Image: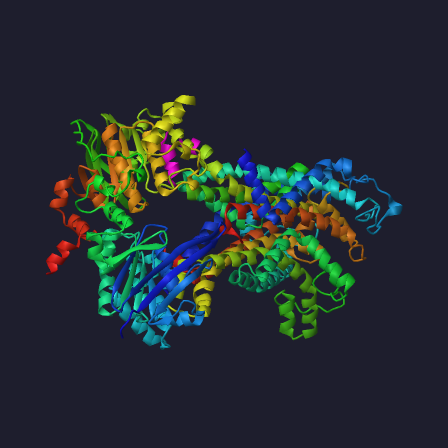
Amino acid sequence: MAVFRSIGRRVGRRFVASLPALLGVVVFTFLLMRVLPGDPAAFFASGPNAGQEEIDELRRQLGLDRPIPEQLVRYLYDIATGHLGRSITTGQPVVRDLAERLPASLELSLCGLVLALALALPLGIIAALRPGSPIDHGVRFLCTLGVCVPTFVSGLLLIYAFYVLLGIAPDPTGRLDIFAAAPPDITGFLMIDFVLVGDLAGLRAAAAQLLLPAITMALFVLAPLARMTRASLMTVLGSDFIRTARSIGMTPWRVIMVYALRNALLPVLTIVGIVFSTMLGANVLVEKVFSWPGIGSYALDALVASDYAPVQGFVLLIAVLFVIVNLTIDILYGIADPRVSIE
Amino acid sequence: MNATLRHTGWVLRSNPVTTFAAGGALAMVIVAILSPWIAPFDPVASNVPNALQPPSLTHWAGTDQLGRDIFSRLIAAAKLDLAIAASAVGLSFAVGAVIGSFCGYRGGRLDRAVGRIVDVLMAFPLFVLAMALVAALGNRVENIIIATAIINLPFYIRFARAEVNVRRNAGWVEAARAGGDSHMSIVLHFLLPNILPTMAVQISLNLGWAILNAAGLSFLGLGVQAPTPEWGIMVAEGARFISTGQWWLVTFPGLALMLAVLCFNLLGDGLRDILDPRMRT
Amino acid sequence: MSGPLLQVEDLHVSFSTRGGIVEAVRGISFSVAPGKTLAIVGESGSGKSVTAYAVTQLLDTSARIARGQIRFRGQDITRADAAQMQALRGAAVSMVFQSPRSALNPIRSIGRQIMDAVGAHHALPKAAQRARALELLQAVRIPEDRFDAYPGELSGGMCQRVLIAMAIAGSPALLIADEPTTGLDVTTQKAVMDLLARLIVERNMSLILITHDLGLAAQYCADVAVMQQGKMVEQAPAAALFRNPQHEYTRKLVAASPTFNSTVADLVSAMPATDRPGCRPERSVERREGSTAPLLEAHNLIKRYANATAVGDVSFSLKRGESLGVVGESGSGKSTISRMVCRLIDQDGGRIVFNGSDIGTIPARDFHASPLRRDIQIVFQDPHDSLNPRFSAFDCIAHPVRRLLKLTGTALQRRVAESAERCGLSPDLLPRFPHQLSGGQKARIGIARAIAVEPRLLVLDEPTAALDVSVQAIVLKLLDDLRRDEGLAFLFVSHDLNVVRMMCEHIIVMRQGQIVESGASKGLFAAPKAAYTRDLLAAIPHFEPEPVLAAEA
């Protein structure tokens, strides 16, 4: 129990420590958006011939005529009370837009991560156990290739191969075929919702739609995960305590399972956190390629349209997700590594 | 000097993959520099009747929706993409190595604070940061360079910090102080030259990453604008034609990107192996 | 059962490296009878550890037994397969390793690790494993409440006890200890070795002790085998071997190991002059009397780190041409003192007066520009670590000369060459880089660099701790000669009492940042006043077996 108490303390400390980072992100994005060259008031006025009065009116409505510090304070107050403003393009509150789209992005990223882990861990482990073997070289080659192909290219090539040439993948736009019926919105995660209502055909359709973008995501992060697994397991296998374990006559299987793997997965855990963060960023590219209605494509559209509020909301959401991911990793790390709870 | 040359020759001979990568990278740089003279067609001249031709002997990589020769555009784009990546990495290396070395050497509270900030930055989705930066600063080449440099910066600071940190208590650093060197001179004359080889590895790996980043930004329409030939834009333009089967519009710029990144990554890996065989991953 | 427990015949072990095949062990034979103890002694690179790992087949993957035979209880195990060896390890042959901290799994509690060792050969229920692990903890004198502790929470000595508990868990007949106490303090070393010796006798095991320390070998093993460059040069009962070494190398090794009454000249007495360039051939000359004026005075020095006091209120003084030894175990604050005196770190309190001027008032960060910088130089512990890997030997020595004496051109070259020659470095070594030089050569460069600016005080921070005894002997002789010729004053920091006694007229003994005892070295060794000093002296392993045998008889 002491372990959990100390993990709790650690997580608490980390949470408090990440608050300034969050605040920094908020202020940073606010300032960034204020120096954006495009003038949203001019952009959203009725047309290119809109009069100065009309623009000024819009400006006043949006609060853009106040001094910047005042705008910042108002903005912070709004965030604290859960108001992220209204998107000019969709006309909806940003919070609602983001809440609608977040499950799509998370579903995609998580599936990609799970897929990547399911491939990377065994590959990395086999490569580390048989260094110099054909499998090792194969994994090395795959990893080198994996980091070289940009997600937007691999996504397009996957579409070409599986949709255009082979015709086995569904039309690569959106989360669901336009002819399929969407499930009731329970969690927002399509696959979970289909399972909840027992619609297996729907589940299949949603999974088929998700497969290509998820593979694209997975390919993108496969390399760092497999490399880290291999390197870390190699280091552990070469360390003194593995020699000790062998010297007391432990079976090779137990040496690997009990002594090597658990120690080797600690650095991998850290990398998983960083990888997931990277995926949140790469989401934007993959979502654009597959017309995936997630937060990334939402932010991108807003960015192109000089629509401040959604972009700020998006960056803030990413920052919050990032804090959550890191805290989760911290908790897992605390459970896996007793040294953390000692100090 | 002769001995150095002989050693380099030996290193290249015993690492064929690295030699290949170094050759590839060098060839790409040469092609990029000579691009105005060696491109078979004008990369921006459109020729609509000739649009969307598949690869042929005249048009090695086919033509795009405006009938422009894709191969010539690829060569022209190499110059821009490599220049962006090299300037961005150079900028962040120069700034990052100096900040990182001084923090790592000095230690203490400032160093810990910098370390924490860098850790947070590194875990933050940096591509989002780059998007926001380019959007804020404007769609110009300089701004892509600045944005890419800024998101590369944490890596260099962290790397230089770590490398200096393991050396700051080395006997030869203390010996240099006993030998009359100031702290400043130790960082500049002793530590920086010592971490340079490992930094070279990082530079090579980061060049690849920077290329991907810049291309990703322009793919989203945030970087360089059409009709400028640029690999990311070419992929974005070709994306519209993938579902109708005109694969060459996406594939060739994709391949160019891949080759460029591959060469720099292999070169980096090779350098790392040469410098430290134990780090082989 | 009669016959040897372990018999090794004509063993050859080779490594395949980038530079080709390297023979680490070249045809050695030895045997160990049940209940007997054998020490395999040698300097680094002698192949002693490789021999141990060859027996248990825990060699690196690049190593291979090229020839020879290893028999255990008459059974040939030279080419035993993985399953056979696994059955043997722990249950018949066990090992105790160097650097105990890293030899334990950092994220598994020590109790669990001992249970793993218990469970490796007996399929016992968890509760029985636990009970047995607790017994073993008790046997190695670790309190039961440390069962759930992790290696990071224990001292090095404690970790070594845990390793011993794991090694004896399967009741093996043979225990191989590979440098089990290297890196541990001398008092901890004694405790661990005494425990090991007692367990060997109690459980009727055989022991092979791999060590570089002749004293340790003599004190804990009945037989001693000496290895040099992969060959066994001599093998004899301990008493006979040390009293009357036969082989030239053994003679050299025995002479080079400092004892309670050896002098610096004795250490190199068995070496041909060509082996020790730079050292004067004649026996030591009259010791030059130090003048009465103190060169260095330290008053009430204090240094605190975040939550501990490294040095608390320490005062001492040192005359011109005199040598003061600072002795202590790890954490005693001796290295901190050397760095404060050298103005590499600031003190938190107290004064440092050098030649009449209060240098303690100059912040360490500005001292590099002080005219006194050249007067106080330092030689570091690890000769490899103290040379910039990107500087040639010449640059290493030349750099401080350029900075502090502002010499350039031929004047610089002449000064470097002189200094190198004084330290017995031949000129053709100067263009080389550190990785192309041996440990002894690197140590000489470190010394040449320090004396090149003609300092008046030389701080020596464990200058020979990382060197083999024969190299240590030469370096000590060189330092001693330098001091006499140049009239240098030494502040000699070391953990090795024997070395300090030979090198210094005065000694201070430190423990946990405090001076425990101080005085002239002769008196301090003959009649130590503080209990801690007595413990320290008693813990030094020694190989003059006569008095011990006499006491027992």
Describe residue C462's horizontal placement relative to residue B271 as left or right. Answer: left
Residue C552 percent coordinates (x, y): 12, 60
In the rendered image, residue B173 lying in the magenta stretch gets the answer: yes
Residue C349 percent coordinates (x, y): 25, 36
Name the residue rendered at 32%, 33% in the picture. C423
Describe residue C11's horizontal placement relative to residue A253 as left or right. Answer: left
Give the dominant element type of the magenta stretch: helix, strand or loop: helix
In the picture as drawn, the residue positioned furthest to the right comes out as B49
Describe residue A251's horizontal placement relative to residue A197 as left or right. Answer: left
Front position in the image: C210 or B134: C210
- In the image, the segment drawn in magenta is B169-186
- For the N terminus of chain C, the quadrant is bottom left
Instruction: Answer yes or no: is residue A93 visible.
Output: no
Instruction: Answer yes or no: is residue C386 visible.
Output: yes
In the rendered image, residue B84 lying in the magenta stretch gets the answer: no
Name the residue rendered at 47%, 63% in the picture. A261
- For the C terminus of chain C, the quadrant is bottom left
Residue A222 percent coordinates (x, y): 60, 58
Residue C107 percent coordinates (x, y): 40, 61
